[in-house]
Amino acid sequence: MKIGDLARETGVSRRLLRYYEEQGLLRPRRLPNGYREYAEADVADVRHIRAMLAAGLPTAVIARLLDCVHDDDGERMVPTGCPGMVTDLRHEQQRIAAEIDRLRTSQQALDTMLTSALRQRDPHSAPASNRS
């Protein structure tokens, strides 16, 4: 199938499909006229890429793990036993947890600044609610 067909079937833009190719996530065959030819398996690969991106994985990690997943009968992504997969996923889980902590700290600092700014503007206003 051509890139337009894959885009329609997956709901992913041609531009994004080309980006996935640049990142080594998709490897379409090139026809003599330069057109990309995708296999039916690329539809599942795009679905897997999208799921892993939604989980916060960077494309470099997805490139290592993409061959480690397959679909079950209901087209749900299922991991297979690949060396390093658990280590990669744990590392990414820790990275995301650290980012969440950093964002919470930023949110608390911003809440404090906003509360101070509101008090400066109107000393009689109620303090802003804390969104932890």
Image (tube, rainbow, N blue to C red):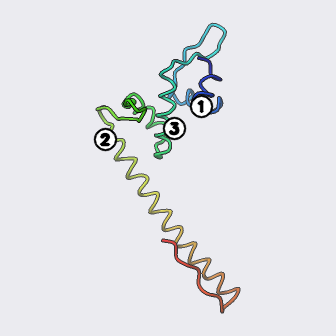
In this figure, which residue is indicated by the disc labeled 1? 19
Specify few, some or many for label 1: CA neighbours under 10 Å numbering under 14, 14-19, or 20 or more.
few
- Location of residue 23 with respect to 30 vertically, above or below: below
Alpha carbon of mark 1 to alpha carbon of mark 3: how far? 13 Å
Alpha carbon of mark 2 to alpha carbon of mark 1: how far? 26 Å
Q: Is residue 86 left or right of residue 33?
A: left
Query: Are the residues flagged by discs 2 and 3 in contact, CB closer than 8 Å?
Result: no
Alpha carbon of mark 2 to alpha carbon of mark 3: how far? 19 Å
The amino acid type found where label 2 is placed reads Val
- Location of residue 90 with respect to 116 vertically, above or below: above
Q: Is residue 81 left or right of residue 74?
A: left
The amino acid type found where label 1 is placed reads Tyr
- Location of residue 50 with respect to 124 vertically, above or below: above
In this figure, which residue is indicated by the disc labeled 3? 50
Quadrant that contains the N terminus: top right
- Picture residue at 65% right of the left edge, 13% below the top: 34
In this figure, which residue is indicated by the disc labeled 2? 86
* Horizontal and vertical percent position of residue 60: 47, 36
First along the sequence among labels 2 and 1: 1
Q: In which quarter of the image is residue 84?
A: top left
Residue at the front extreme, as displayed? 74
- Picture residue at 64% right of the left edge, 86% below the top: 119
